[in-house]
Amino acid sequence: MILICGATGRIGRQVVHNLIPEGHKVRALVRDREKATARLPGHTELVVGDMADPDVLVSALEGVTSLLLVSPVNPEQVTLQGNVVRAASKAGSPYIVKISGLGTAQDSNVDCGRWHAETEQQIVLSGLPYTFLRPLFFMQNLDFQLTTAKNEGVIRAGVGDARIAMIDVADIADVCAKLLVEVSPWMNETVTLTTNRSVSYPEVASLMSKHFGRVVIYSPQTLDAIKANLRTSGQPDWHINILLQFNQAFLQGLGDVANSRVADLLGRPARSLEDYLAQSFDQSPAVTDSDPFPS
Ligand SMILES: NC(=O)c1ccc[n+]([C@@H]2O[C@H](COP(=O)([O-])OP(=O)(O)OC[C@H]3O[C@@H](n4cnc5c(N)ncnc54)[C@H](OP(=O)(O)O)[C@@H]3O)[C@@H](O)[C@H]2O)c1
């Protein structure tokens, strides 16, 4: 039995959709049965409950041989994920695939990087077999820029022209599914997950121009401007701080670390930013044939 935490989220949901058609037994820990039923394929066994509830975790982990540990960035994440690790230790010795992220280190300047490192350390100390996956930047983070890119021809970010090795969530899900089934390929390894090429935001804008059939420019933002916008939008301080820390980490070059691990594991190239943009355009064409392409 494979347990997926965060099964209604971006990564978890796609992992379940990968595993069920292949006939694997999948259990999903979900907070909302209705949402889960709408998002997940039939034959997914649902355990309704919260990672904050140790009793639910005991039932969720019964008979589990491998599990995906993912939850949102949140000041409670160490406690929530720690509950899962403790329950897993009591249940036996399931293999844990944990999603960590940018700046994961005990002395990180990124708050959630320290939180991820704390859970990783807890897993190591538990003696359970594990793989720690560290994607840096989901291509799908660009989703919210697509409408302004297509309609106004501009994207905005605070990372200057720093290069970032992004990754498509679909590739993270493919990696997770393979590991959860086969267990052995990256046993007790920590792997940074990226495409094989990092890109700068000026390049992202240029690729968008090509794929969306109109000129898209990159308008770099100062961190002060980003902070002011986030304040206006009512984000809590802890989240604003983390978003600014992400920008600083990218500005320091922490995102420019492309590798070929995804391709090595999956035996095919990781999806490129061009693939993601082509798919995004196909899925929600916001520009018409009459839009000029003044190249
Ligand atoms: N965005 C990036 O570029 C990026 C880059 C690197 C790493 N990451 C890492 O990716 C992770 C987030 O992955 P994601 O985008 O797939 O997450 P997501 O889409 O935000 O989904 C989070 C999932 O966790 C569930 N959840 C939240 N709180 C829970 C609780 N208390 N108990 C049980 N389930 C709970 C949610 O359920 P509901 O549907 O009920 O809310 C949802 O299924 C984070 O750890 C982040 O650090 C992100």
Image (tube, rainbow, N blue to C red):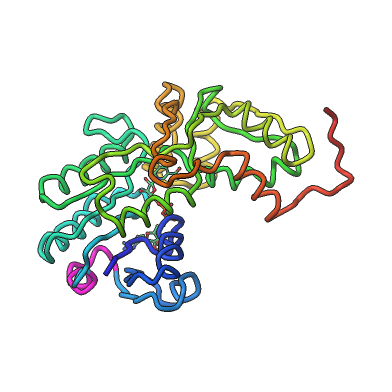
Image coords of residue 34 (percent x, y) = 45, 77
In-front residue for pair 64/242: 64
Which corner quadrant of the image does residue 258 belong to? top left
Which corner quadrant of the image does residue 240 belong to? top left
Q: Residue at x 39, y 38 (%)?
A: 261
Q: Residue at x 44, y 62 (%)?
A: 18
In-front residue for pair 130/49: 130
Most frequent secondary structure within the magenta stretch: helix
In-front residue for pair 124/191: 191
| Horizontal side of residue 195 vs 98, given as left or right | right
The N terminus lies in quadrant: bottom left
Examine the rendered structure and indicate whether residue 28 appears above or below residue 282: below
Image coords of residue 22 (percent x, y) = 42, 68
In the image, the segment drawn in magenta is: 50-60
Instruction: Please state the total of marks drawn on the protein image.
Output: 0
In-front residue for pair 121/181: 181
| Horizontal side of residue 185 vs 155, given as left or right | left
The C terminus lies in quadrant: top right
Q: Residue at x 24, y 57 (%)?
A: 80
Image coords of residue 146 (percent x, y) = 66, 45
| Horizontal side of residue 194 vs 158, given as left or right | left
Image coords of residue 127 (percent x, y) = 10, 50
Q: Residue furthest right?
A: 290
Q: Does 122 lie within the magenta span?
A: no
Picture quadrant of ligand 1: bottom left
